[in-house]
Amino acid sequence: MTTNHKKLGAGVTAICILELISKFFQLSLAVVVLLKKEDIGLWLEKIGQSNIMNAISNQQVMITICLSILAILGLILILSKNRIGMYLYFPITAINVTMLAIQNSFQIKPLLFALVLPVILFILLYNRRNVF
């Protein structure tokens, strides 16, 4: 087995770390929502926003948790210069963006925000494809 001593580059590393932070935050919030849904619903009812928690189902939260875990695994594999990480991260991101588009009624701002870092990461990885 040969070892690969080529570097990923500062851009790929920075984007992966930003995405990891984002996915860990998304994962922790999804777990909190799953565990404390009733308490959050009561609090939102007090401030007059009770319809928000009614729109979120446990299945959506579980799907978000699974997608976050798989995206984190893909990013870790990308940082370890494993090609499987790219094959895992980008389809999971496409599924996540599709789910976001359906949930937000195809509004453009959430979609653009969700696509910025993955598109930049794709471009940077494409330019560094000889590392893998």
Image (cartoon, rainbow, N blue to C red):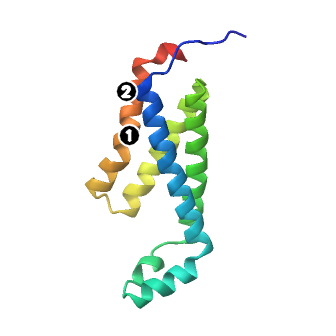
**Would you identify the image quadrant in which residue 58 lies?**
bottom right
> Horizontal placement of 66 versus 120: left or right?
right
Mark 2 crowdedness (10 Å alpha carbons): few <14, some 14-19, many ≥20: few
> Horizontal placement of 36 versus 100: left or right?
right
- Badge 2 element: helix
Which residue is disc 2 drawn over?
Answer: 123
> Horizontal placement of 58 versus 50: left or right?
right
Residue 41: horizontal and vertical position, in percent? 50, 83
Label for residue 117?
A: 1
On screen, residue 106 above or below 127: below
Mark 1 crowdedness (10 Å alpha carbons): few <14, some 14-19, many ≥20: some
- Badge 1 element: helix
The first of marks 1 and 2 along the sequence is 1
Residue 98: horizontal and vertical position, in percent? 42, 51
Which residue is farthest left?
108
Relative depth, front residue between 44 and 92: 44
Which residue is farthest top?
2
Residue 89: horizontal and vertical position, in percent? 53, 38
Which residue is farthest right?
1
Label for residue 38?
A: none
Q: Going 55% across and 30% down the picture, which residue do you hit?
A: 78
Residue 126: horizontal and vertical position, in percent? 42, 22
Relative depth, front residue between 15 and 91: 15
Q: Going 41% across and 38% down the picture, which residue do you hit?
A: 118
